[in-house]
Amino acid sequence: MSADVELDRVTVRFGQFTAVKEASLKIAGGEFFSFLGPSGCGKTTILRTVSGFLDPSEGAVRIAGKDMIGIGANKRPTALIFQNLALFPLMTVAENITYGLRVRGMSKADRRKRADELLHLIALPGQGDKLVSELSGGQKQRVAIARALAVEPQVLLLDEPLSALDLKLRQHMRNELRAIQQRVGITFIYITHDQGEALTMSDRIAVMNNGVIEQVGDGKAVYDEPRTSFVASFVGENNPFAGRVAKADGTGAVVETPFGLLRGRNPNGVKEGDKAILFVRPEALRVGEGSKDATVTSTVLNVAFEGNASHIFLKGADKKDITLTVGRLERVEIPEQGSTASVTYNPDLGLVLPEGKLARE
Amino acid sequence: MSRLFVYLIPVFVIAVFMVMAHYEKRLAHDPTHRGFFDRNGTVLGVTFIALVAFWTLFLVVLPYLYMVQESFHPKLVAAERGGPKDILTLEQYRSFFIQPTDGEVNTTHLWAFFFSLAASAAVTVLNFAICYPLAYYMAQAGSVQKVRLLMLALIVPYWVNEILRAFSLRLLLASKGLINQVLMGVGLTDAPVDFLGNNVGLYVGLSYAYLLVMMFPLYNAVESLDKNQIEAARDLGAPWWRIHKDVVVPYAKPGIASGCTMVFMLSAGSLAAPQFLGGPQTLWFTSIVYDFFFQAFNWPRGAAYAFLLLAGCIALVMLMLRVFKVSLGETIK
Amino acid sequence: MSSQSIIKVMIGFYVVLFFAYLFGPLMVMSITAFNTPSYPSAYPFEGFTLNWFVKLWNHRAMMDGLVNSIIIGIGVICVSVPVGLAAAIVMNQIYHRARSLYYLVTVSPVLTPGVIIGISTVIFWRDFSEMTGTRGLFYKGIMLSIFGQASFISAYCLLIIMARLQRFDRAQEEAALDLGASYPQVFWHILLPFLRPALVSAAVIAFLSSFENYNTTTFAILADKTLVTVLAGEVRQGTTPALSALAVIIIGLSLFGAIAYEVAKRREERRSARIAERAKLAERGELAPADATPQPA
């Protein structure tokens, strides 16, 4: 059984500090939904509001259409997987997994049976009598998942559960989490600052900054059609060129940048004279000259060979390098360090957005 | 009636406490914070509060207040209490300064008061001097296993109670004791030295009784000091005594303060060492209090003296903390 | 280099001297327990005897006192450990500024001279029991000794339990809640087991502090006797090697306790080393394909 989750103008304040500002969105039942943002952006606060550890200062949280205000964490149809997992160190693996059933008054024999089923599900059969401290990081992870699933929640909340694992295991666990979600079919709400995790696993992503939800959409939309400067700079690599809009019409705009006039699409409808930023992704740039309003010329600072691709760094404005990625098989001549080179892009792949805060590098 | 008045004070304090808590809750609104009964459930919450209330009220605050209250009453037999003779009076405090029998200045008790505090201060300094080197050595040089063994070796003697420890020192220091036997055997002295009469026994006994009380806070304080700081000071060419004066002692100040406070308070309030190791002429202040209870049966005067002792000790400790610029908060942590 | 080794020798000498000061008197006393003269003396050693232990065993007052001491010790555990636990939990949950006032009240008994605690306890309960007509229940030596000792021993327990409570991971509590536990269930299932080691040490410390207390008990015990007050009386009257014999027994028990503690500690260390070893093995097998793919349920 899965349930939809609705945030209705949720605001959370800690004393003077506002952690979340008027967050509104609807998560469909059975969806894998991620909140993505840098640390301190309020994503964990949202998660804790949904799980019931704190009440919003204003607004409402509804799960399956039911208002959750005043309902404690232990009475909600949600289960949370903590960042540090919070497994109970003094209980065995099986006791951990069935703890939620124990407090619901299930008999010992039934619990034992259920533990065996769940241990099988997480590929740790016969390991129920081990202590948690005897397990590896990945095994602990799976025990935490089993413990949360044991209570058959309608919504599973995950608070950066992979951050403690090393890289290789993390990528493996991404697939595993996605597989588990598809198997059990319940709503997953996933919190992360790692865009790779969010993009690979999620049906939809909410990008957050400073307590505000900047954009909601699927991975492709967030990557290809960012609505704000923050989203454009936070999700994936991007080269910003800031300046004033010199010319704007329905489809495109030209920005006066330190590298001359540059053109891009104009989805937000910026107007002539507005401060704006043109974004071009590293993979959209090519070495060579193109049309004049889509070419940047600058000094080559560094070239980094990375196997499947090479990165070329050009001197940009404000001490920010312009990055350009060239695929291994593209067979272009890579300019030498110290030389002056021109790079160009297809103006359809440039994006002009109103000026706003960029993500910290 | 004054006895009932005593109950109003804790009620007032609790009210202040509640107001403070309420005010702070309003000041720093925190949506994660749950009410006390919310967080513990009603049954457990009430149990916790009841236990704490029983302790703080019936075992700590009310007894203190009753003692103070008693000290402002005259000495009465049980039947007279609550009768017309049961008035409030400063008589007991006056008697500390002026002898009630002959109107003379009460030099005996004043001297005992001064002597007890001064001797306790001396013992505190002595214990600090004895413990500091070992605490420093254990904290900075010892391995984990070695330190644990040293700790056990320190603790074991303290499972033997105060009386027996005093007794063991008496066996050593008595005129027929082992030390005098040795001294006379070697020929250093012809007649036994009266260690107990000249108060050497008292000082040794007090120091011995509270060594550990000094040791632990010192060790804890020095232990958390980063060894690199000492190395750095040494590299810069500081002589060893400067390293201690400029680096270790300032860092360990809160620990030193709490060790010294504890030793001082315990010495000033000690009963066993003065009773069993003090000379016949020595009057320790707690012994006077003891005698008021068990020989003169003058409880109000005993209570007054006990209160004076407490006030004197606290005043001296506060003064010392002020002089050495340590806050009380750091000391009791 | 030579100044280094001089310092080493000096430190060693100092440590030896320190422990001689600490143990010397106890060792001398222990020897007197086995020497025949009726005045306790270590030298000359006139003859070996166990007579003083027999004397001790037949000392009625001391044995009665011992029974009272044990009763009081158990009573103090029953009061102080729950009070210390409750006080620690309350301390952990109240707001910041109110906390310092609370801290001052709860820790003050540690610094108050025991004599004063004893006196104030007696005076308060004398008047309180009279006022409420409960003199027969409360105004008794054993009761008052428990109350008086618990006054400051509860503070010890508070400090011990508090130290462990501060290391408690709030996420544990939240995880249990999230799985549907009620707050009382969190307390019984999660918090109490976590605090168990601290509760055990608090109980041990409480008993030992109670057992050896003199300053407070000598007032609070009224006309009754505990082992320590009987001892005090004996020492005041004079000296007998029977007291040394008692000391020998206490020292023996202490040493036994210390060794048992050390052995338990080492066993615990070995155990956690084994567990850590197993976790490391599991870590290594982590990415082995057989282990890492979940089976469909």
Image: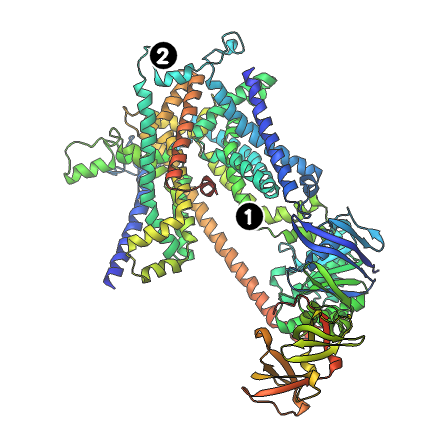
Q: Position of residue B296 (x, y in %)?
A: 39, 15
Q: Of the numbered discs in the image, which one, if any, rests on residue B100?
A: 2
Q: Give amino acid for label 2.
A: Pro
Image point 32% across, 27% down: which residue? B114
> Which dot, 1 or 2, sits closer to the camera?
2
Which residue bears the numbered disc 1? C164
Relative side of C61 to A306, left or right: left
Is residue B269 at all visible to an observer of this figure? no
* Residue B156 drawn above or below residue B189: below
Q: Amino acid at mark 1?
A: Arg
For residue A257, which numbered disc appears in the image?
A: none
Q: Position of residue B245 (x, y in %)?
A: 32, 50
> Observer-nearest residue: C235 or B48?
B48
Residue at 40% in and 31% down: B315
**Which structural element holds mark 2?**
loop
Q: Nearer the viewer, residue C243 or C52?
A: C243
Q: Is residue B3 above or below residue A343?
A: above
On whether disc 1 and disc 2 are found on a single subunit, the reply is no
Q: Position of residue C48 (x, y in %)?
A: 30, 39
Q: Secondary structure at mark 1?
A: helix
